[in-house]
């Protein structure tokens, strides 16, 4: 469990970096939000997402023009 948590702690900032820095690349946003949706399916992932305030970021993306990004963000929020 500690290895998985350490992995999450290292991965989440990278994924958030994609959301902030690659906003002009819809495919990058789709893949980053998809990964966040998968991470948020576990209790460890939810805790790490809360710690990194992922919920605030994905809520801001709920108004995105690409329905795939909105769909993935809804998955994160639902999980």
Image (spheres, rainbow, N blue to C red):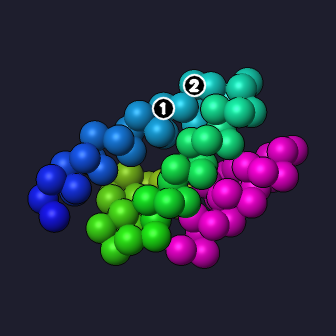
Q: Is residue 12 above or below residue 48?
A: above
Q: Specify few, some or many for label 2: CA neighbours under 10 Å numbering under 14, 14-19, or 20 or more.
A: few
Magenta-drawn stretch, dominant element (helix, strand or loop): helix
Distance between the Cα atoms at labels 1 and 2?
Answer: 6 Å
Taking the magenta stretch, the answer to whether it contains residue 72 is yes
Say which element carries label 2.
Answer: helix
51 vs 7, left or right, is right
Which residue is identified by label 1? 17
Q: Is residue 62 left or right of residue 9?
A: right
On the image, which quarter does residue 58 sit in? bottom right
Residue 61 lies in magenta, yes or no? yes
| Residue lying at 41% horizontally and 34% vertically, measured from the top left | 14
Residue 3 in percent (x, y) is at 15, 53
**Residue drawn at point x = 22 percent, y = 56 percent:** 4
Estimate the x, y position of residue 40 in percent, counting from the top left.
46, 65
Label pair 1/2, CB-CB below 8 angstroms: yes
Assign a secondary structure to mark 1: helix
Residue extent of the magenta highlight: 57-79
Classify 42 as above or below 51. below
Q: Is residue 59 above or below residue 57?
A: below
| Residue to which mark 2 is pinned | 21
**Residue at 33% from the left image edge and 59% from the top image edge:** 48
Using a 10 Å C-alpha cutoff, classify the residue at mark 1 as few (fewer than 14 neighbours), some (14 to 19) or many (20 or more).
few
Residue 75 occupies quadrant:
bottom right
Q: Position of residue 21 (x, y in %)?
A: 57, 25
Depth check: give the residue in front, 19 or 11.
Answer: 11
């Amino acid at each position: 469990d500690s290895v998985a948590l350490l992995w999450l702690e290292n991965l989440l900032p990278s994924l958030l970096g994609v959301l902030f820095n690659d906003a002009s690349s819809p495919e990058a946003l789709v893949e980053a939000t998809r990964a966040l949706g998968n991470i948020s399916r576990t209790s460890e992932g939810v805790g790490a997402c809360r710690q990194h305030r992922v919920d605030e970021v994905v809520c801001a993306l709920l108004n995105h023009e690409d329905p795939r990004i909105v769909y993935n963000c809804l998955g994160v929020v639902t999980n």
